[in-house]
Image (tube, grey):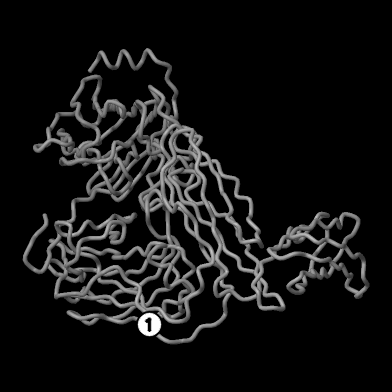
Amino acid sequence: MFLKPINLFVMKKILLLSSVLLFAYFAIGQTVLFSDDFESYNTGESVAAQTSSWTTWSGATTSGEAALVSEAQAHGGIKSLNVIPNNDMIYNFGNKTSGVYQIEFYYYVATGSQAYFNIEHIFADEWAFSCEFAAGTMTLNNDAATPPTFAYTQDSWLYFDILVDIGNDLITLDLDGTELASWTFSTLEGGGAAANQLGCINFYGPANNNYFIDDFVYTEIESGLTPPTIDLTATPITTATGDDETISFDNTGEEELSFVAYPIFDDNFSAKNGTKDGIMHVDGDNAGNAVGWASEITAYIATRFSPEVVRPFMGQEITSVDIYIGDAPAGDITVYVWDKGGFITPGTTNILDQVTITPTEASWNTITLNTPILLTGDEIWVGYYLTAPLDSYCVGIDENATIAGANYIKAGPVWSEFGGIAGTGNWNIRANVTGTSWPIWMSVAPATGTVAAAGSQNLTLSFDNTDLENGDYTGTLAIGCNDQEAEWNEIDVTYTVFVGVDDVKQTLATYPNPTTGIFNIETSSVIENVEIYNTAGQLVNLINVNNSKCVVDLSNNTGVYIVKINTIDGQIIRRVICE
C-alpha cells in the first residue's frame, strides 16, 4: 500500500509531524527459494486466486485488488503479471533476520504510466525503501534526506537486482547491471532506525499506472540461521495432589526464542452477582486532551489488555465500555471487543461483540454490549472504529506516561503501536466488569523469558485449592513464542478437588477417561479401597489399596463403569468409559 506517515495533533496545540562482495557471495552455494515466470497460470485471472505464493494487502484474491495474469507483455515466454490501479501484490520473504538474499525481477512500465514497488522490513508497518516511477524518471525513497532520481526507459523491460546482506546490514540496488545505490538496510524509508529484517515486497498500482512483472526470482546467497523453533509436547496435565508440575520445551532453532506463559481458565463457576464490581483499564483520567490528524483518517483505536491486567477480573464479564471522545468524528463510531491475534505481531482475530453509536463529543461515552464477554485470563482487546475529519481531535488520551504494549491503532491492514506524544498518553478506553471473580487456582513461572539457540526451558505450574469446592477444575496453559509456525501453544490442565467427611480439603485425579484399559487414581489422601460397579449396579471388582495412588486394570472390560473411591477422608464417585 502506498502510505504516508500519520501526523498527529495533541491538545489542539502540537503538530506531530560493491562487486567484490558479490563475487564472494556467489562463490558460496546458492539456493533458489522461489521463482515465478507466470507461465503456469490462467491468462486474465487473478494470480492470488491461483497460488498461495502471492497475496494481496487485505488477503483478498479478487481482481479488484489482485493483479491479473496477462499476455500483453512478457520478458520470457508469453505471460507476465499485469499491475493496474489499486492492485497490491505481495510476496512474503519469510521475515528473514540473518543471511544474504537476492531479489531479481523484470519490470515493464508502459508509456504515460506511473508505477511503484517497495520492500518492507515489517509488513504494513516498516518500509525499507520504495521506487516511484513517473514518465522516464524513477525516484528511490531510501534513507536519504533527499531521495535520488534516475532515468529509465519506458516500454522496455528493466532488470532489477536487489541484494540484502542482513549480517552486514547492507542493501544494494542495481538496475540493468548498474548499481544505483547502497545503504544501511536497517533504516526506514525517509530515515530512522528500523528492524534489520527482510519482510516482503509489494507491487502497488497507483493511479494512472499500467506495468508488468516477469521472471521473479528470490535466492538465498548465504544461508541464514534457523529461526526460533519451539519443541513442545503438549501432553495434558491431570493432577489431584496439587504438587507442582514441570513443563519443558526446547528451542531447536539457531536464533533466540522469546516466550510468554499464562493460564487460561474454563468456566467451572456459575455464580455471578450481577453488580458493577470494577473497571478494567490502564489509562488515567482525561483532562481535555485528544489527538488528531493533519488529514482525514479512518482507523481502529484499541487498548490491548494483557493477561496480567485481565487476571484480577477473571470470571467477571465485560458488560459495557467507556471511551472518551474529543471532537465529534465524521458520523457514528463502532465499539468492538476482540480476542487476541498473533504473538509475533500483536493484533486481533475474532470480533466478540460490536455496537454502533452516535458519540457525545468532549465527554466520556458508556456503551452497553449486546452480549457480556467473559474474562478467562486470556488477552483481550477493546476499542472503536471511527473516521476523524481533517484537523479534528477525536481520540481521547490521558497525561500519563505511555504504557508499552497497550495502545494500538490500525489505519491499514495491521495494528501498529501508538508511542504516545513524546512518551506521554494512553487511549481513554475502559471496560466495565460485573460478577464475582474466580479463585486463581493455577499459576505459572516464569511468565516470560528467552531461550538461547539449542537451549531448554522449564516452566513450573503451581496449584492452589484456596476457596475451591469439591469438583474438577479445567483450563489451559498458554505458551506464546516467536516461532512463526507455532506462535501459540496450549496444554490442557485438570485439577480435581474434593472435601472429606471431616471437611479437610483433598484433591483427586482419575485418568484417562475414556480408557482402553488402564485407569489411574491419584489423591492427596489415602485410598482404602476402590469399588467397581457395572451399570446394573453389580459389584465387578473390589481392590484394597492403602496408598495415595492406584492403577485399575479394565483391559478385559468394555462399557460404562461406576468407580467408588473410598479414602480415609470420604468417598468420591467417578463414571468411567472403557473402550
Number of residues whose C-alpha sits closer than 10 Å to that of mark 1, classed few (under 14), some (14–19) or many (20 or more): some
Residue in the foreground of this view, choosing between 512 and 367: 512
- Looking at the image, residue 577 sits to the left or right of residue 407; the answer is right
Q: Does dot 1 land on a helix, a strand or a loop?
A: strand
Residue at the (65%, 61%) spot, across then down: 241
- Looking at the image, residue 137 sits to the left or right of residue 417; the answer is left
Residue type (three-letter) at the residue carrying disc 1: Thr
Whole-percent x, y for residue 278 in the image: 37, 79
| Residue 78 quadrant | top left
Instruction: Give the residue number, with chain letter if any, for mark 1.
Output: 368
Residue at the (27%, 41%) spot, across then down: 210
- Whether residue 46 is visible: no
Give above or below for 205 relative to 419: above
Whole-percent x, y for residue 29 in the image: 43, 17
Whole-percent x, y for residue 540 in the image: 92, 66
The residue at the far left in this view is 13
Quadrant holding the C terminus? bottom right
